[in-house]
Amino acid sequence: MSSSGKLRIILDSTYLLPIVGIGVEDVDEALLLLKRLRDEDKAEYYYSPFSLLEILGKLSRLKCDQGRVSAGLTSIGEEFKLAHPTAEGYLKALVLRAKGYRDIIDLLLYATSLTADKLLLTRDRALIEFLRENHEDVKNILREEELLEKYGQL
């Protein structure tokens, strides 16, 4: 998850939404820290095409500034690296979906982070609780609170 000493983090859509103009409550502190870690070359960030799909779903239900959305999507593609799921990741997400977790996108992000040896930054407590209840490895999950506590003081 940090082979070069850098944190390698897949960003949940929570951290991408503001880039396309969708406000997210209480995310500013985390975004500022993410920017600082990147500016200091301590972290690199990844996004999933599934997060973009999730973002498009939210945008389709809102009035949005198409220019802002276009600029935001372009920025995501230029500023972050693309994290592709593996066949193993797809299968893992399907197995977990069969165990009862309804949000397949969250499961795909989790499985991608697990199989790609990257952290998944999320504030999704329901996902973490589900994974723990099902005895899944959560070492690759970085909760927003942990990010702020662990790296906010550097």
Image (spheres, grey):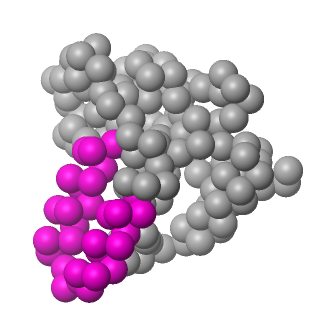
Q: Position of residue 133 (x, y in %)?
A: 41, 25
Along the line of sight, the residue nearer the viewer: 132 or 51: 51
**Residue 3: within the magenta?**
no
Which residue appears at 37% of the width and 21% of the height?
Answer: 134
Residue 69, compared with residue 83, is above or below; it is below
Q: Quadrant of residue 78?
A: bottom left
Residue occupying the far top of the picture? 88
**Residue beneath the point at 28% across and 82% down:** 67
Q: Residue at x 26, y 61 (%)?
A: 55
Q: Position of residue 74 (x, y in %)?
A: 35, 63
Q: How many marks?
A: 0
Q: Quadrant of the N terminus?
A: top right
Considering depth in this image, is 115 or 147 the residue closer to the camera? 115
Looking at this view, is 64 or 139 the one in front?
64
For the record, the magenta segment spans 48-76
User: Which quarter of the picture shows residue 152?
Assistant: bottom right
Left or right position of 62 against 148: left
**In the rendered structure, does residue 59 fall within the stretch colored magenta?**
yes
Residue 34's place in the image compared with 141, above or below, is: below
Give the x, y percent position of residue 22. 36, 75
Res 130 visible: no
Secondary structure mostly seen in magenta is: helix
The image quarter in which residue 150 lies = top right
Residue occupying the point 74% across, 29% down: 5
- Residue 112 appears in the picture as rendered: yes
How far across and how far down the image is residue 16, in percent? Answer: 42, 60
